[in-house]
Amino acid sequence: MADTQYSSTTKKDDLIVIAGAGGFIGGALARYFQNKGFTNIRAVDKKPLPLWYQRVEGVENLCLDLTNEEYCKIAVRGAKEVYNLAADMGGMGFIERFRIMCLRSILINTNLIEAAYNAGADRYFFSSSACAYNVKLQEDPNCLALKESDAYPAFSERGYGWEKLVSEMFCQEYTAERGMKTAIARFHNVYGPWGTWDGGREKAPAAMCRKVAEAKDKGICSLEIWGDGTQARSFMYIDDCVLGIDKIMHCDALNATPVNLGTSEMISINALADIAMECGGIKLEKKYLLDAPKGVAGRNSDNTFIKSVLNWEPSITIADGLKKTYAWIQSQYDDRKAGKSTVKDIA
């Protein structure tokens, strides 16, 4: 990324607030900024501290429910930059079952962006999702990659997708009416170590890795797959995600402009299962659950726009990323079996 595209007056000791920092991406982002030398980071999540996925040493941690307006004011007091990654969400099974819970996340963004504006924050980041896209464009596993303009005419994923689309509008209007700098990234299936890997909220890459690890341990000869396995997705490794958040947040050309943040490498769930089995060094028979939640038939990220603006796109392949993810989940599985605390047990 050219230096002329990176615009930030934030100093290393200015306050950065990360909402949802007790979760997978938020925790990784807190660690990312600390590794870059930022010394004043406030991490906020409604979960009690022992239930956070990561706690980064030297970071201020607050346990606050950000659906509450007054708690939002406390969270952003003195903030230079605010990153909103707080939401009730999970994999497709969670999203399809708990639509009201997903919709209620709009309260977080509504209250947090108002509080951030009143606190004088310079920049505000909102974590949107590819679920905001028109589902009618995703009915074929061989669908075209989704461009940012494909969110309209609107026909988002019920619950979670509509919450994301409306929250994007809030960001755009705060820029248009009040001049606040906002950044909007539409995430495409983020995965990696320190993410949910069991319990119902995990996404497909983590679920596949866990099932393979379990099959090896218990002598199971089959691998359970939701749907017929032809569903296709792109999956973004966590390191690409946090780097992309930083780049998008600090590019004035992307102010109040939704942008895809995902790889353009689309693979089927069948292929994802094959990679997971290769990582585990085992071959299993695929067992298809045709009545299980499976989401849209095909979804991929068109990265034409982000490359044209940032001269960058997420590039870590699913093969490389899943290898690291599998190794971590295998260690988590082994730790749980040995009676040690794991992310699943505390999340």
Image (cartoon, rainbow, N blue to C red):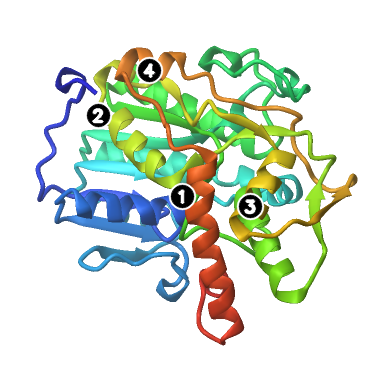
Q: Position of residue 153 (x, y in %)?
A: 65, 13
Q: Is label 1 in a helix, a strand or a loop?
A: loop
In the shown orientation, is residue 257 left or right of residue 271? left
Location of the N terminus by quadrant is top left
Residue 307: mark: 4
Q: Which residue is mark 3?
A: 278
Residue at point 16% right, 51% down? 38
Above-or-below relation of 302 to 298: above
Of labels 2 and 4, the one closer to you? 4
* Figure disc tally: 4
In-front residue for pair 215/337: 215
Is 193 left, or right, of 250 in this rendering?
right
Real-space CA distance between mark 1 and mark 4, rounded to the nearest whole angstrom = 27 Å
Mark closer to the observer (4, 3): 3
Question: Quick check: can you spot residue 90?
Answer: no
Q: Is residue 4 left or right of residue 85?
A: left
Of mark 2 and mark 4, the one earlier in the sequence is: 2
Pointer 3 or 1: first along the chain:
1
- Tell me which amino acid carries mark 4: Lys
- Above or below, 277 against 113 in this view is below
Separation of disc 2 and disc 4 at Cα?
15 Å
Say which element carries label 3.
helix
Residue type at tag 2: His
> Circle 1: is it few (<14), some (14-19), or many (20+) Cα within 10 Å?
many
Q: CA distance from mark 4 to mark 3?
A: 32 Å
